[in-house]
Amino acid sequence: MAKRYELSDEAWGVVSDLFIETHGRGRPRLSDRLMLDGVLWVLCSGAAWRDMPERFGPWSTVYQRFRGWRNLGTFDQMLKRLHLRLNEQGLINLQTWMIDSAAIRATRASSGAGKRGPDESADHALGRSRGGLTTKIHMLCDAYGVPLRVLLSGGQTSDINYAQPLLDDESIPNTRGRPRKCCRWLLADKGYDAEALRRYCDRYRMQPVIPLRTMKRKPKPGLPRLFDCPKYRQRNIIERMFGWLKEHRRIATRFDKLAKSFAAMISLACPMRCLRHLFSYSA
């Protein structure tokens, strides 16, 4: 039986081939499964790398292995693999998707990093908002609470600016045909009430379920847009999804200086959510 914060044998069997162990000259390479369990311990506990228990081996080795997986995009590959498995078993809702964002407070130690590589944003996804120094997580998930795609921005960024980027590159893999790139209903709160997003939904034949903000609007020709209130009540799913995500203390507060390191932690938490769906529903 797996210990707390560690992968079970069934979960490791699904993703083990993504962590290929290479044996070269020198010291024997420590087990990738043990190193991944160490990264999960940091993700869930929120502790510093140096405070890692000795059973995982040297903390510097675990951190270097995490950096390697981060740079190779291994955690994103895990998420795609699990999306395929869930879709094959009908555990991804292809009809109803929802978008939202959450602001994560960052510590002072997370600021002040220099530019690191072409993939790192200049501001490291940090910005000043009413909550101080924050990072905003923009997420797309389905009606079952399966995370589909995540983007980061500074805390001062408007939600609507990341609505279309979330939807543009999303594709649910399918072994029987083309990947699924759009849904039937898109749920969002008043922060996404913009005519550009509604036209985007019309272009891909999606029905936006977005309440109107209280503001003066110019009268437009044609039939008025209808608001499906019973359907909108399902949006609590993504709110609970963010609540679950913040149970990982490494995500509830940002300690990482680099945006790609913080994004890698979120990219690791999302497959854990998918594994939870895969095995709980299979059981």
Image (spheres, grey):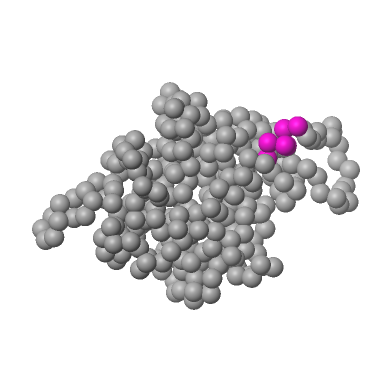
123 vs 200: above or below:
below
Q: Does residue 142 appear to the left or right of 84 in the view shown? A: right
Q: Quadrant of the N terminus?
A: top left
As drawn, which residue projects farthest toward the left? Answer: 25
Kindly identify the residue that appears in the image at 62 percent across and 63 percent down: 155
In the displayed structure, 105 sits above or below 175; it is: below
Note whether 110 is above or below 206 in the view shown: below
Query: The C terminus lies in which quarter of the figure?
Result: top left
Residue that extends furthest to the top in the rendered view of this protein: 176
Nearest the eye: 181 or 272: 272
User: Mainly helix, strand or loop, the magenta region?
Assistant: helix
The answer to whether 236 appears left or right of 148 in the picture is: right
28 relative position to 191: left or right = left
The answer to which image quadrant residue 174 occupies is top left
- The residue at the point 59 percent across, 49 percent down is 243
Q: Which of 201 and 133 is in front in this view?
A: 133
Q: Is residue 134 visible?
A: yes
**Residue 171 x, y percent position in the rendering:** 50, 37
Please name the residue shown 29% across and 66% down the image. 60
Stretch of the chain drawn in magenta: 230-235
Residue at image position (48%, 35%) is 277
Q: How many labels does the image show?
A: 0
40 lies left or right of 135: left
What is the x, y in percent for residue 89? 46, 25
Q: Does the magenta stretch include residue 234?
A: yes
| Residue 250 drawn at (x, y percent) | 48, 59
Percent coordinates x, y for residue 115 in the rendering: 44, 71
Determine the image quadrant of residue 184.
top right
